[in-house]
Image (tube, rainbow, N blue to C red):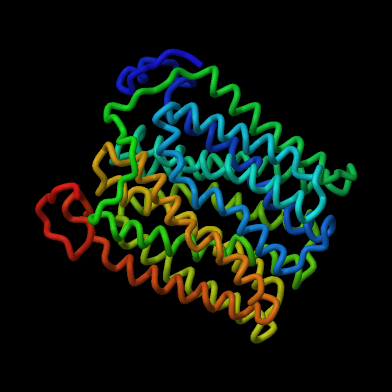
């Protein structure tokens, strides 16, 4: 680890050592481990441990427990710099991913998943905070869109290799997990020692922050966490359980998602910049409600695999518009609130995630269509909340119910 460098002095550094470059490196490294784990997960758990819908629900409940305790980041940054904590967490995600296939049983998979999830959620909490501190408000939507595209591009390379070599070379789950997790861990260690410690101009509050004027942001985070769990847990599981997708077919579907994200994520960032958070989030939530209703139609009306695959890609693209929720908070937040509120928001985001996958796993055994109908209802609630976002949010004007004049930070 190198010396501390004020953020305003970082522009004098070589391009490869600047804060935004570090953000891009981390954005590329994290999904190589996490997305590879996700792509192989449904096939791995079914083949190695005979998982059913209930088991996969419990797995994702365990995976979300560290997200619920992301508020612990506030305590850790009292002793550890955010940048260091983020990179150590990223390395932990990589190492745990690399070891995933070493534990092919229900208990083993749950344990290693918990460890990798601690790394993932603590990294994501800190990463969101650093993004909002290091990128100015005017450029944030566009840069965040490019960061999403960078992560998709890096993962695309990994997925292409899986699709091309899985059957040709007779790859095993252990080999792929080792390579993907090892890459992420090595990049994290490189960043830890190659970059200076960047000092943002606004010191962060190192205690829990809950402000009344952020209530709409909290509510949107809660609904996003509940809604996203249904997609993450059950949309991919449906492709394997109902349509019999094999590893290379699931990965091919992920490849389509990645290419679409690489093309569309920068455009989505531009859309947020041009049309504002209110309009883009309304579009996202309305689209998600329709997609989840169509997922239900697959079970109600027997619609086929082609539609299911199309819906999966559209679903994934719409979730990318969630960057608008980040920029909404950046516009209404006190500069010193970013780090503690990122931790609080992650915890709020995971309140439903801790119990929802397990409960819906049992509902899935009875009626998969009902799971997706519930998700459509959640998307509709999010749409109603998005209607409360002002066209130009700012401190003191966080919702259309707020006065236009700045208000105290309570």
| Count of picture labels | 0
- The spot of residue 61 in percent (x, y) is 61, 59
Q: Quadrant of residue 349?
A: bottom left
- The spot of residue 77 in percent (x, y) is 42, 32
Q: Residue furthest top?
A: 3
- The spot of residue 172 in percent (x, y) is 85, 45
The correct choice, above or below, for 285 with respect to 117 in the image is below
Q: Residue at x 75, y 73 (%)?
A: 242
Q: Nearer the viewer, residue 111 or 300?
A: 111
Q: Quadrant of residue 178?
A: top right
Q: Quadrant of residue 164?
A: top right
- The spot of residue 16 in percent (x, y) is 49, 21
The answer to whether 330 appears left or right of 347 in the picture is: left
Q: Residue furthest left?
A: 405
The answer to whether 157 appears left or right of 229 in the picture is: right
Q: Residue at x 90, y 45 (%)?
A: 170
Q: Nearer the viewer, residue 313 or 116?
A: 116
Q: Residue at x 58, y 43 (%)?
A: 118
The answer to whether 388 appears left or right of 297 in the picture is: left
Q: Nearer the viewer, residue 192 or 243?
A: 192
Q: Residue at x 61, y 32 (%)?
A: 91
């Amino acid at each position: 680890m190198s010396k501390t460098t004020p953020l305003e002095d970082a522009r004098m550094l070589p391009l490869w050592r600047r804060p935004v470059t570090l953000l891009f490196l981390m954005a590329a490294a994290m999904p190589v481990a996490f997305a590879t784990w996700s792509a192989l997960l449904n096939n791995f758990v079914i083949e190695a441990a005979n998982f059913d819908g209930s088991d996969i629900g419990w797995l994702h409940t365990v995976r979300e427990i560290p997200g619920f305790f992301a508020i612990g980041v506030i305590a850790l940054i009292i002793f550890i710099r955010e940048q260091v904590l983020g990179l150590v967490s990223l390395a932990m995600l990589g190492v745990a991913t690399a070891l995933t296939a070493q534990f092919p049983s229900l208990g083993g998979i749950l344990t290693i998943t918990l460890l990798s999830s601690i790394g993932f959620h603590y990294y994501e909490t800190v990463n969101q905070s650093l993004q909002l501190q290091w990128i100015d408000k005017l450029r944030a939507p566009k840069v965040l869109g490019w960061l999403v595209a960078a992560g998709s591009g890096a993962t695309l390379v990994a997925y292409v290799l899986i699709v091309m070599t899985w059957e040709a070379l007779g790859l095993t789950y252990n080999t792929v997990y080792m390579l993907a997790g090892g890459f992420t861990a090595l990049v994290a260690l490189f960043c830890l020692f190659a970059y200076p410690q960047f000092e943002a101009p606004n010191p962060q509050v190192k205690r829990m922050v809950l402000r009344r004027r952020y209530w709409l942001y909290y509510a949107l985070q809660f609904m996003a966490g509940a809604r996203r769990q249904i997609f993450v847990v059950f949309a991919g599981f449906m492709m394997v359980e109902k349509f019999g997708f094999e590893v290379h077919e699931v990965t091919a579907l992920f490849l389509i998602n990645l290419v679409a994200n690489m093309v569309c994520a920068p455009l989505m960032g531009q859309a947020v910049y041009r049309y504002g958070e209110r309009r883009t989030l309304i579009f996202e939530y309305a689209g998600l409600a329709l997609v989840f209703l169509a997922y239900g139609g697959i079970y109600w009306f027997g619609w086929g695999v082609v539609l299911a695959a199309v819906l999966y890609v559209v679903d994934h693209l719409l979730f990318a518009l969630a960057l608008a929720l980040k920029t909404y908070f950046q516009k209404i937040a006190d500069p010193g609130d970013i780090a503690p509120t990122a931790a609080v928001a992650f915890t709020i985001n995971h309140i439903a995630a801790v119990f929802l996958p397990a409960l819906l796993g049992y509902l899935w055994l009875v009626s998969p269509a009902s799971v997706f109908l519930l998700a459509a209802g959640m998307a509709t609630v999010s749409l109603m909340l998005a209607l409360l976002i002002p066209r130009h949010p700012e401190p003191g004007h966080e919702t259309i119910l707020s006065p236009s004049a700045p208000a105290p930070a309570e």
